[in-house]
Amino acid sequence: EPEVTQTPSHQVTQMGQEVILRCVPISNHLYFYWYRQILGQKVEFLVSFYNNEISEKSEIFDDQFSVERPDGSNFTLKIRSTKLEDSAMYFCASSPSRVEQYFGPGTRLTVT
Amino acid sequence: AQSVTQLGSHVSVSEGALVLLRCNYSSSVPPYLFWYVQYPNQGLQLLLKYTTGATLVKGINGFEAEFKKSETSFHLTKPSAHMSDAAEYFCAVSSSGGYQKVTFGTGTKLQVIP
């Protein structure tokens, strides 16, 4: 069964550094999403992406965040200058139909 | 605006007992409702969904949920708990328009006692 994959599974970075989290959505899906889950808190929506542009973003998704679909398979989340409070599990999701979303296993980002 | 409230951050049941995880939602438009399960150190797996039509929906692993509009509820049940059901369960809502950002509840950790 097709799955969303994410790399790396765990990323450790120093405050102020740039990180890129990578996702490979399910191949025939058209809608892509990033969510994050700070330890002990609920999963929060960051951004949705369709037709090579952002369709919706939350107030969390400020100027330090960006997303890109550089080729036909990858979907990336970039954080330009990481802060301690960016430490979280980041989930990528994709959807064929804007109804159900299929989530990847997540990337645990630790900012030191 | 949409939101989800899950009653009980921790629920313990005995193996073989009924599982009932409670979820109430708020949505200004007809909702889509979901239950996801998260096993330790894993991602979110879709258990079941309600979009339109039949209000009792069946999912994987013997779980089902009933959409009750009058009560704004979408409780998750399973007749007989199995040890492998121990996980965290998230109720979630999205709207039937737009790009369907999903809003999650705070999660309920299910413990199954042998």
Image (cartoon, coloured by chain):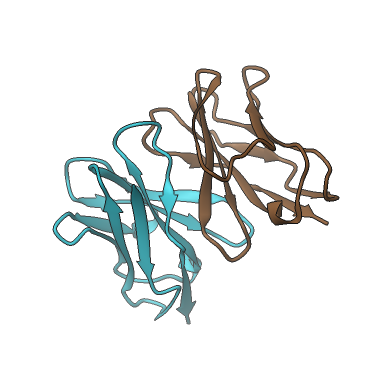
Chain colours: A brown, B cyan
Horizontal and vertical percent position of residue A41: 55, 62
Give above or below for A97 relative to A61.
above
Give above or below for B52 relative to B5.
above
* Residue drawn at x 36%, y 76% as measured from the top left: B16
Instruction: Report the front residue among A93 and B18.
Output: A93
Horizontal and vertical percent position of residue B3: 36, 54
Would residue B6 be seen by someone viewing this image from the given angle? yes
State the image quarter where residue B80 is shown: bottom left
Horizontal and vertical percent position of residue A92: 58, 39
Give above or below for A92 relative to B3.
above
Instruction: Report the front residue among B95 and B111.
Output: B95
Horizontal and vertical percent position of residue B79: 29, 69
* Residue drawn at x 60%, y 62% as measured from the top left: B40
Would residue A33 be found to the left or right of residue B35 on screen?
Answer: right
Would residue B3 be found to the left or right of residue A56 on screen?
Answer: left
Would residue B74 be found to the left or right of residue A104 on screen?
Answer: left
Across the whole image, how many numbered discs are drawn on residues?
0
* Residue drawn at x 36%, y 63% as measured from the top left: B5
